[in-house]
Image: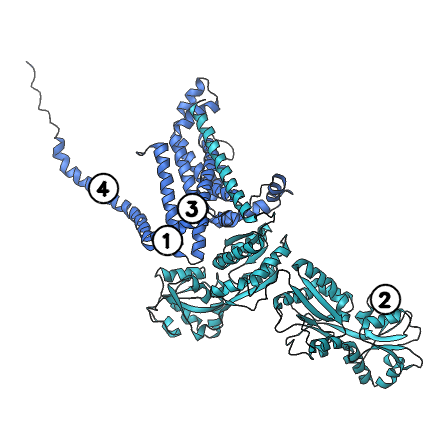
Amino acid sequence: MQDRKSPVTIPPSPKENWVPRRRSDTLFFLVMSGISSCFVLLIILLLVADIMFTTPRNFYDALSKPEIRAAMRLTVLSCTAAALLSVWVGTPLGYLLSRYSFRGRWIVDTLVDIPIVLPPLVLGLSLLILFHQPIFGLQLESTFRDSFGIPIAYSWRAVVLAQFAVACAFSVRTMRVTFDQMNPRAEEVARTLGCTRGQAFLQIALPQARRGIITAFTIAWARALGEFGPILVFAGTTRMRTEVLSTSVFLELSTGNLDAAVAVSLMMVFLAVAVLLVLRIFGAGLNT
Amino acid sequence: MNRQTMVLIGSGVVFATMLFLMNASNSTQRNRGLSDQAQEPLVVFCAASNRAVLELIRLQYENEFSRPIQIQYGASQTLLSNIEVSGTGDLYLPADDSFVELGLAKGLLSEVFPLATMNGVVAVRRGNPKNIQSFSDLLRPEIRLVQASPDAAAIGKRTKIVLTEKKLWDRVEAATIAFRTTIVDVANDMVVHAADAGIVYDAVLKSYPDLESVQMPELHGIVSKVSLAVVTGSKQPQAALHFARYVAAKDRGLVHYAEQGFQITRGDVWSDQPELSIFAGSMLRPAIEETLIAFEKREGVRVTRVYNGCGVLVAQMKAGQHPDAYFACDSEFMSQVPDLFPKPVDVSMNELVILVQKGNPHDINSLRDLTKKGLRVGVGHEKQCAMGWLTQNTLRQGGLQTEVMENVTVQSPTGDMLVNQMRAGALDAAVAYLSNAAGSAEHLDAIPIVGLSCSLATQPFAVAEGSHNTQLAERLFKKICSAESKETFEAEGFRWRDPMPQGKQSVP
């Protein structure tokens, strides 16, 4: 005869606990979304206020100005060039800082953050000084201008360089975090199977870091778009030559053209949103 | 080729394309600006607040002369720092002339072109909804008053000085809700309804149709000047000065300044290559000729000089000839044309001496020795030149006029002619300026005339009232007052009077 087993406690139906859990989740989501929505709402309100301040006529007027169109063109080209350059430099530097311990790593790690913490005008002034101060008897500006026929300061090259100086720091930081979060085991396995370090980097690490690279490019591009201080000092704001949208806003504001300044600002927002959406669609997919 | 390599190559191609497009766009723009002339563009560092007016002038100038103007806009102080660090640029146009003074003190700027003045007013929204009519209204508790910072903006600094003198500053400061970095921030605050009133310059309000000004007597004295300055390190000063003259011409650039609400200064009449006429005493020729040549070369202008005895020059002017500037041998001959030259400035002094042959063979040591029998003496003509007039005064003061005049064989309109006659051996002694003998030390000795104060002549310079080239003449005066010019004057035997003490930048 089989011993009668003591009765087993049947676990309660999920439905029995559903109501109280739902209550606590609701509260959780209310608090979290309430806090989050403050920021989102702020951004929306800012945009709404800007849109209400300006009119379609202001947009049309701003867009019909050849100097604004030239500034928009230069903005897109220079931001893209600066962002690409930032990713090229940021990827290997982020990889080295993430994967290897070497003497002076903390110094390099600190140095790459300097453009982020430096006041923008100081960065521009530093670039200007760098290119005009003789260092070991060599003045960079005159060397580039006289020997290669390529002036840097107050040209579009200075715009790209000023944007790159700040954007690259963000790119390095992003890429380092990306590689930090990637398990190095796959690269190590590849090396045991005969890959060189270079092959492991190119064929294993880089494909894995794809989303990080796109994020780095996006951040670098966006940062370059908003760059203002270093461009103002190092590249100047010559109409049709070194004027980008951020400096156009400053110039319009300085001459009391608030309507035009807001119109150009909104143009920058639309431009940024368009570029970021395209990047997401073609780079990482809409769901990421 | 794997995917990673393709992406790398693709990004390189995109990067190269970006650079190519930027370069191509820049070249097209430059070529468009240069037209068919391969001229270096003039680089102007301009305060953003002057952008509207300078763009109009730039377009007009480029159409007229096909010389490209490249304008860098920014904040005045930032632009000055750029000039200092990069050593580039041709012209500097800050928001107000406090930055010009700073640049002059640092040696970064040279010639200055006054363009306009601006006056401090209270700005309110159009229609004056808060009914701000008087100074006491500004202090009402419900009025949100903003000002430019006395530490960061020239108008803020000037406002503080003027109101402190009138013992009103403490109350205004207490009533001010915010001090902004720039005057534009103050105006913008009112446009976006962040403030009800602000102290700004009247010219700024032209850009703000939504604002209007309220004049208040308490703000009288808050005045600022707008000036354009040539960068000392400019590699094309002549071209820079050409454009600067254009901007400062009353029938060119200043027309636009007036349209933009500035109170313009009295500019020169525009001329592509202006001609400046100057009357100067003959004795001044060796002291100023080099300076005039250098001035012509730098400015790209022509200076027509008329050197003669000052009596002759005065007669010419009274007969209807009106030069742009007059440099007299003595103030006596300046005072004879006060209507033409109301504001003379003393530049140098020159002393009368007795010129004798080298070695002083006739042993002449004082004016009394000129009375020796048989001596051939030359003096200046008292009606034709300052030197002659001064000589007669000196002889009269010494009580020797009649006796010396008995030996006078020549009365010349200029000192140079006396020196020539001395060197030719036609005279034994002559009373002339020490400067006349400069360069003749191998042939002549100079005996000082002691104890007679009137033997000293003072040379004043003045710009003609009503001249069409007032600013050009004033810049010439500045050149004449420069350190290099001073050296020349002293080398020629003149004493320097320090006509333009350090820090003083314009002719009174």
Looking at the image, residue A80 lies above or below residue B151 = above
Mark 4 residue type: Phe
State the SS at label 3. helix
* Snapshot colouring: by chain
Mark 1 — residue? A58
Is disc 3 in the same subunit as disc 4?
Answer: yes
Which of discs 3 and 1 lies nearer the camera? The answer is 1
| Screen quadrant of the N terminus of chain B | top left
Q: Label the blue chain with its letter.
A: A
Mark 4 — residue? A29
Mark 3 residue type: Gly
Mark 2 residue type: Ala
Looking at the image, residue A157 lies above or below residue B379 = above
Is disc 2 in the same subunit as disc 1?
Answer: no
Q: Is residue B97 visible?
A: no
Label 2 marks which chain's residue?
B
Q: For the view shown, which residue lies furthest in the top direction?
A: A1
Mark 3 — residue? A226
Disc with the residue nearer the chain's start (3 vs 1): 1
